[in-house]
Amino acid sequence: MIPLRYGADGTGRREDPTMRAFRADRFGQFVHWGLYALPAGTWKGQTIEFAAEFLMQSAGVSREEWSALAADFTLDGFDPAAWARTAKRMGARYVTVTTKHHDGFCLWPTAHTDFSVAATPSGRDVLGEILDAYRAEGLATHLYYSVLDWHHPDWRCAVDSDSDREAFERYLRFATDQLLELAERYPQVRGFWFDGTWDASVKANGRWTHEIERLLKERIPGVIVNSRLRADDHGARHFDSNGALMGDYESGYERRLPAPWDLSVTAHDWEACATLTQASWGFHDSDWAERGRKTPAQIVEQLAQTVSLGGNLLLNFGPRGDGSLAPVEVALAEEVGAWMAVNGPAVHDSGPAAGWDYPGWGFYTAPLEHTAPFRNAAPQEPETPDEDPTGIVHAIVVRIPVSGLLTLALPAGVALRAVRARADGTELPFTPLDAHTVQLAAPAPTGMPTVLVLETGSAGPADGLSEPNPDVALV
Ligand code: LM5
């Protein structure tokens, strides 16, 4: 063990009610909204096939020119109640909203820079209105904050001189002031989501990242902070130099997921974030963005894969410059929501199905009280050895084999009592192949993943075939 001053706090997985609620929520909506939604990927007639929120950088726009966009931030179609309704109907249980992205523009009237909604025609507290709208729908709220800042004169990517050091010290003071201001103005938030922390300047300031987490938790008891904020004494990020997770959950999976069989990630809490288009978080008004748009089935598959591995999925929406959602994003949310209305129990309050190996054709999830992490949590009823581990497991079928048959490998000691379609309760007959394996006819393709409810019990002498698989016995 390397002694660290700014490493993980050493307490391991959080099991307090706030963290348990966040874990059980599983599905959140990410919202990227800022000045970049106005040019929406095109600058002076040139469409740049790169994330819209990077346009200031990718099109080489000066601070002055970019700041002038504030005059057009007029909220003509701004309808946070509609955003919140869309998220709720989709099945999201929380929202994470950009307060300040890399361009430095602040969605709340901050006292610490002029570059905010206060300098736009409405002057309204846009962030506050968004948070209130989501809370009115019963969603928990989290704040995204990019430490990186292309607007602030004191931001540095690296600190190579005394003057850089002085400037960056001032910058960190500014960021601290803003974060404490956010905590004071919006104390109902459940979490902070940090971004833009990968530059050498931040990695050399692990002490600051440690202090920010401490300060936010002091101001808002129980608040949840992502690992992306943190660097340790040696610049190690997310996981400290001893391999322990910093922050409350791992947040490194961006536009990618762990492999479906990678159970190593179930050791800690994590959240992946995903875009609706291939690569833009801010609204990108282009054929390029549309060509890369994901389908509802792809989104649901990512959600199922995430939950089967014990993670949360934060699915991004990029409202347009006028503050309205693009109809194509509302339609996507509606289709995902229609699936969630039927199959939500396979996602919400669910996690990995302990002992059920990745089957290739989809994913297994199980209600959280049956998953491994909660077995370790104190206090629990002592388990009696002959207790029947009856429970349900959800099988989320995303790839139907050309054989039309699904093979299920049962964990040792588990027997299958019944298989039903989640949608209508129809029972699907199955055939035991041996004591651990059953086979059944795959459900008919619907264009969306099909969820099967597996009713399980303890395996006894009557379950499976008594004769061992001769291949296994011989080799
Ligand atoms: C690095 C290089 C090109 C595009 C994106 C990145 C890393 N990601 C980001 O800078 C921000 N994180 C996302 C959650 C989103 O906010 C993106 O802009």
Image (cartoon, helix red, strand yellow):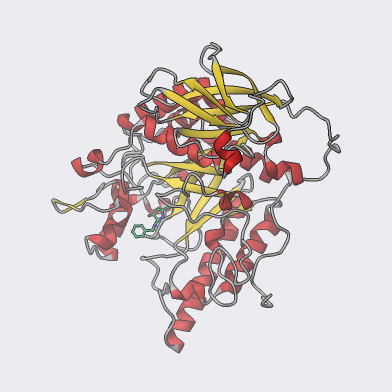
**Which residue does the image show at 47% across and 77% down from the upper left?**
168
Q: Is residue 468 above or below residue 98?
A: above
x, y (%) of residue 164?
43, 82
Q: Of residues 296 and 156, which is closer to you in this image? A: 296
Residue at the extreme left of the image, as rendered:
45
Residue at the extreme front of the image, as rendered:
474
**Observer able to see residue 282:** yes
Q: Quadrant of the N terminus?
A: bottom right
Q: Is residue 288 above or below residue 412?
A: below
x, y (%) of residue 291?
23, 39
Left or right: 83 with respect to 384? left
Instruction: State how many labels appear.
Output: 0
User: Quadrant location of ligand 1?
Assistant: bottom left
Q: Of residues 120 and 63, which is closer to you in this image? A: 63
Left or right: 39 with respect to 299? left
Q: Is residue 306 above or below residue 111?
A: above
Q: Of residues 185 and 189, which is closer to you in this image? A: 189
x, y (%) of residue 361?
44, 33
Residue at the extreme bottom of the image, as rendered:
162
Q: Quadrant of residue 122?
A: top left
**Which residue does the image show at 47% across and 63% down from the upper left?**
147
x, y (%) of residue 280?
32, 48
**Which residue does the image show at 41% across and 49% down from the upper left?**
256
